[in-house]
Amino acid sequence: DLLPECQGKGTGRQLIETLAAHLRAQGVKGLMLDVAADNSGARAFYEKCGFEALKSTDKGILMGVTL
């Protein structure tokens, strides 16, 4: 989570890209996360970062990206 004043400035994308680069360097093949089903803003953000919905439940959506 980012503070509202930090959102929309590319900080979240930089964090995801830094994490993904580190994980790739460690040989990790993919990254998954869970998003609340009603959190459309987070879902849109992760989709822009390349994540895809893998599985939906009544409580959330499992999203993933291949590294």
Image (cartoon, helix red, strand yellow):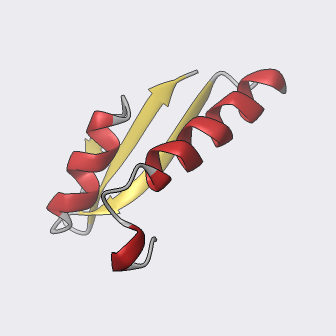
Give the residue displayed 66% in from the left and 42% down from the top.
19
**Residue 27 seen by the camera:** no
- The answer to whether 48 is drawn above or below residue 24 in the figure is below
Query: Residue 3's image quarter?
Result: bottom left
- The answer to whether 45 is drawn above or below residue 57 in the figure is above
Give the residue displayed 45% in from the left and 71% down from the top.
2
Give the residue displayed 42% in from the left and 69% down from the top.
6
- Residue 26: % across, % down: 84, 27
Query: Residue 46's image quarter?
Result: top left
- Residue 28: % across, % down: 73, 26
The reply, left or right, for residue 35 in relation to residue 26 is: left
**Residue 29 seen by the camera:** yes
- The answer to whether 39 is drawn above or below residue 29 in the figure is below
Query: Residue 34's image quarter?
Result: bottom left
The reply, left or right, for residue 52 in relation to residue 27 is: left
- The answer to whether 30 is drawn above or below residue 53 in the figure is above
Between residues 21 and 59, which one lies in front from this camera angle?
21
Q: Quadrant of the C terminus?
A: top right
Give the residue displayed 24% in from the left and 51% down from the top.
43
- Residue 45: % across, % down: 29, 48
- Residue 10: % across, % down: 41, 49
How many numbered marks appear? Answer: 0
The reply, left or right, for residue 38 in relation to residue 55 is: left
